[in-house]
Image (spheres, grey):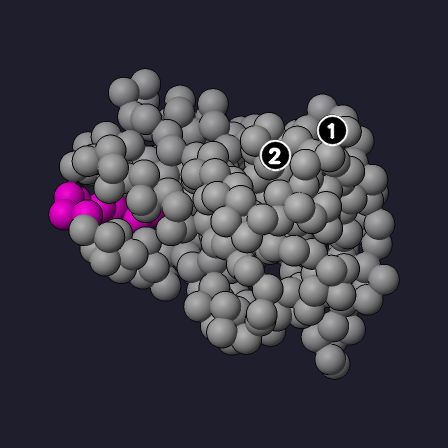
Amino acid sequence: MSCQPIGLFDSGVGGLSVLCELKRQLPSENLIYFADTIHMPYGPRTPENLKRIVFGILRFLEEQKVKLVIMACNTSSAVVLPSAKEAFALPIIGMIEPVIEQVVRLQIERLGVMATEATVRSGTYERELRRAGFSGYVHCQPCPELASLIEDGEDEHRLATALQCYSSPLRKAQVEQVVLGCTHYPFAKEEIQAALGPDVLLLDPAIHVVAAAKRLLEQKQLLCQADAPGSSVAYVSGDLASFERRAKQLLGYTIDAQPVRYQENSGAYNL
Ligand code: DGL
């Protein structure tokens, strides 16, 4: 048994959708959430730039002595996960593999994926689907503005307009299910459902990712078996007050948040 924290990170509030699921499936675990809001959005960034940023976050989480990292960010999982697994001794779980296993199990024939530009450009979803034996049709739809609109949470009209545009190719392709391939998107589930129409099922990877994390911790005998609920703390690289405000709106409670400073020269994040 180990009550060392689980670390998870995202460019902003999106990964809180994974934090909610962690609290549901693994309530005794202590959690460290890293919100890299100074670099939000990740979607337009190059693989080299994302690698530098994500490696800095992983070094920070390593210093906090986490026992496992969940990349609560599809963009990082799509672009940086293989190199991160090579470079760090920490166990690291990404957002993509567990949901792909589920898609194959469900024998879906026409699949849609909504994701950031960097995730779609990486081709990771298609590649991993084929590798897992998926033989159906897949349409990966880049949604360039969507994560930022959800992060800001201020413009419902722009959100609806953007969703009309992103959902149109998916409706034309007559997909049966759509993977919410960015951790921000579950926070706009109702709006996305309205844009896609009632017959399309939405798949939130978080449930499967947390189930995979639980299995891994069980195997390594690292589950925290304390009776009391675990603690959560957030570290934020950008504006603390904006993060706290938006996190409270989305979670319905206040999360203890602390600032971290990003050092441009070294790529390090410091308390
Ligand atoms: N929430 C992230 C993801 O899952 C990143 C969104 C962004 O910063 O562009 O892809």
Q: Which mark is residue 227?
A: 1
Please state which of the two labelled residues, at mark 1 or mark 2, is closer to the viewer: 1
Horizontal and vertical percent position of residue 218: 53, 44
Disc 1 on helix, strand or loop?
Answer: loop
Residue 90 visible? yes
Which quadrant of the rendered structure holds the C terminus? bottom right
Observer-nearest of 78 and 211: 211
User: Where, by quadrant of the figure, is residue 71 drawn?
Assistant: bottom right
Residue 61 x %, y %: 70, 61
Q: Pointer 2: what residue? A: 26
Q: Residues within 10 Å of mark 1 (few under 14, many from 20)?
A: few
Extreme residue in the left direction: 135
**Residue at 61% across / 55% down in the picture?**
68
Q: Position of residue 52 (x, y in %)?
A: 60, 73
Residue at screen point 36% across, 63% down? 122
Q: Residue furthest bottom?
A: 265
The answer for how far apart the CA atoms under marks 1 and 2 are is 11 Å
- Secondary element under disc 2, as helix, strand or loop, is loop
Q: Is residue 237 left or right of residue 145?
A: right
Mark 1 and mark 2 lie on one chain; the one further toward the N terminus is: 2
- 97 sits to left or right of 76: left
| Above/below status of 62 relative to 241 | below
The residue shown at (72%, 46%) is 3
**Nearer to me, 145 or 258:** 258
Any atom of ligand 1 within 8 Å of the CB at mark 2?
no
Give the extent of the magenta segment: 134-141
Quarter-wise, where is residue 120 in the image? bottom left
Asked whether 111 falls inside the magenta stretch, the response is no
Identity, as a three-letter code, of the amino acid under mark 2? Leu
User: Is any part of residue 46 visible from this angle?
Assistant: no
Magenta span: helix, strand or loop, mainly? strand
